[in-house]
Amino acid sequence: MTRRRPTAVPPPPLVAAVQRLQRERDALRRERRAHAVVEQATGLLIARLQCTPEEAFAHLRRISQHSNTRLVDVAAGLLGAVPPPSPVPPPAPAPEPFRPERYLRPCPPSPALEVTGPPPLTGQAAARYHLTRAAMEAATGSNGLAEALAEGVRHLGAGSALLGLLEPDGAVRLVGSYGLPRSVASLWQRAPGTVNMALLRAAVDGRPLWLTRDEAHRRGYDFIGGGAMRVCLPLRRGDRSFGVAAIGWETHRHLDDVERAYVVALTGAAGRRLSALSAGSTDAPAVHWLEAVLDVLPGSVAFWCPVRGDDGSVVDFRLDRCSPDATDGADRGRDALTGRRLLDIHPSAADDGIVAGCARALRDGRPFRWGPGQVWRAGGTRPTQVLLSLRAVPFGDGLLTSWRYHDEQRRTLGRLARLARAGDSGWVEWDLVGGGAVWSSGAYQVLDRAPEDGPLSLGAVHRWVARSDEPRVRDALKGIVGWGEPVDVGFTVRRHGAAWQVRLIADPVLDREGRVIAVHGAVARR
């Protein structure tokens, strides 16, 4: 009896559609990566042969046809300084033969083709590096970048890769992973600084760690996701570590010097791409910390991002995020200042040494103080001079800066005084716990009381009004003290044979238990 082969059950339509879209996406990714490598190789030939882009691409295509090698492999070989396979002479009229020395003669290194990490990469290692770097440049997210990094070291036996960003409290936040179980990646979304982990130590100390599981256990380190070997390399922005990349092996693998240099160079490329992906996004390091800090800070505080010129030097700063009370000392507040540049607000900040001092703080990691000093402030019909002091401390990739306008309080008090004179009014405050009271000069004038006699107590105010108004004023003041009810009462004041109408508006100040501890109000002539 013959057995019938089981017929394959086709996947459901939705599953088949998803699989087809995934295949199309992967094909587009490979095409985009290959295109980037071919573009780099074309640029290299243009520089070395002094030819047009069309001629350079024709050279690449001719080499590919003669050697029966994919165009992207030929391009990667040229970028890695490896002569492609020897050409096979064509049977019919032969075009110009390929001469490797034309393409590989010594020339100054191109900045676009630099590879970081001694010893310099050559041969297949350099070719793999350029192919993987193209995949990294095509990545649009941290997980895609981790996948490209893992694929770039797969030929070395590695099975996983993860990327983390360093936070202000010394913790590492996992932003991208590939090859790790989802449960493990979810568990270690944030590794606090108190945990003794290899990847955390590499990020904080800025030193690479090449560890086997036994070596890690002897040093007290934990592995994320297990495995037999782990490489943890700090990611740098300038001379500072901002994150970490970790590559894991399930089995032991001895890496020679060339392989180690390849891993270091590839990780450096991943760090540069991660820095570009995280810059200015909600996933940037310490963004949620920064917003929480700024929301509770009083006064004018903001996170300043450096604005760099063509040579990389700091030429200005942008107010990226501001505290709720941030102001330029005039009429512009948080919403108007966020996103503006320092030189737009204070055009003289470059000449006054503020920009240079802040750039030095960003470079050296030391706080910078300036002022009090006179600076020009833009706004209004023409710039004005104001008295300013500020303090800036490095925070992540920028500066956390606080500033103060010393003439702001003086101007505010002057405005209030002018309003009081114009409206014949004043403010009054009574402290019911300490028994004190404070009046403005306008309040003494409204109630015709000598300032040297001091303010009236709240319980004595009703005796200062006309006798007919005493019961009504006394009841209103009992209501604000006893039941916390606001006061808006009018009464007559008689002094030296004259009488005038006064209005008292007051609000209670309550403690946590709801008890009235103070009364703040204003008086004005009607």
Image: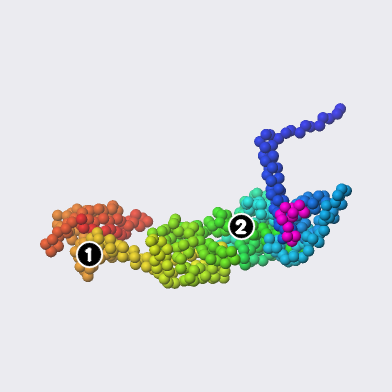
Residue 281 location in percent, x, y?
56, 54
Residue 11 is left or right of residue 310, and the answer is right
Residue 201 location in percent, x, y?
64, 64
Q: Is residue 333 visible?
A: yes
Instruction: Reply above or below: 320 against 355.
Output: above
Q: Name the residue tied to disc 2.
A: 276
Residue 356 location in percent, x, y?
52, 70
**Disc 1 versus disc 2: distance between alpha carbons?**
63 Å
Residue 13 is left or right of residue 509, and the answer is right
Residues drawn in magenta: 48-60
Residue 49 is left or right of residue 137, and the answer is right
Instruction: Report the amino acid beneath label 1.
Output: Tyr
Secondary structure category for the residue under label 2 = helix
Instruction: Report the amino acid beneath label 2.
Output: Ala
**Residue located 41% across and 59% down the image:** 332
Q: Which of labels 1 and 2 is toward the front?
A: 2
Crowding around mark 1 (Cα neighbors within 10 Å: few <14, some 14 to 19, many 20+) is many
Instruction: Reply above or below: 320 against 92.
Output: below
Nearer the observer, 66 or 203 = 66
Asked if residue 396 is among those painted magenta in the image, a careful observer would answer no
Secondary structure category for the residue under label 1 = helix
Q: Name the residue tied to disc 1.
A: 444
Residue 282 is left or right of residue 109, and the answer is left
Nearer the observer, 450 or 84 = 84
Cβ–Cβ below 8 Å for labels 1 and 2? no
| Residue found at the very far right of the displayed protein | 91
Residue 322 location in percent, x, y?
47, 59
Which quadrant is home to the C terminus?
bottom left
Nearer the observer, 2 or 362 = 362
